[in-house]
Amino acid sequence: MTYDLIIIGAGPAGISAAVYAVRQRLNMLIISKDIGGQVAKKAVDIENYPGFDKISGSELVELYQKQLKANNL
């Protein structure tokens, strides 16, 4: 199979890239062990993420999963 884009990692940058790729109708592949990257593994409370005063890593990963599902990823 041929891909327009291969994304390595499903942390914040990888998820953003995937959402933009879907909107551009690119054929893509995401390679990752899990969703969330270091956010899921190490972040307890995040206080510097745009749009949130404070959010836990697990809450942010849930939002990532929701956005991926909404975009059929």
Image (spheres, rainbow, N blue to C red):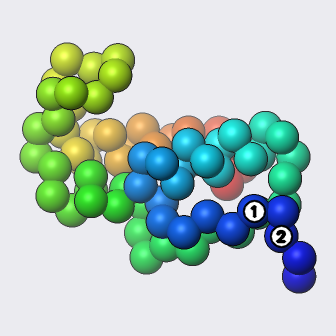
71 displayed left or right of 34 = right
Residue 54, compared with residue 40, is above or below; it is: above
Q: Please, what secondary structure does the residue beneath circle 1 have?
A: strand
The image shows residue 7 at horizontal and vertical percentages of 61, 64
Which residue position holds label 1?
5
Q: Residues within 10 Å of mark 2 (few under 14, many from 20)?
A: few
Q: CA distance from mark 1 to mark 2?
A: 5 Å
Q: Is residue 27 visible?
A: yes
Residue at left offset 48%, top offset 65%: 9
Which quadrant, please, contains the C terminus?
bottom right
Amino acid at pointer 1: Leu
Which residue position holds label 2?
3
Residue at left offset 48%, top offset 48%: 13
Which quadrant, please, contains the N terminus?
bottom right
Q: Please, what secondary structure does the residue beneath circle 2 have?
A: loop
The image shows residue 4 at horizontal and vertical percentages of 84, 63
Quarter occupied by residue 57: top left
The image shows residue 16 at horizontal and vertical percentages of 56, 43
Residue at left offset 42%, top offset 69%: 34
67 displayed left or right of 19 = left
68 displayed left or right of 28 = left
Residue at left offset 32%, top offset 40%: 60
Q: Is residue 65 visible?
A: no
Outermost residue toward the left in this view = 44
Residue 5, compared with residue 56, is above or below; it is: below
Check if mark 1's residue and mark 2's residue have beta carbons within 8 Å: yes
Q: Residues within 10 Å of mark 1 (few under 14, many from 20)?
A: some
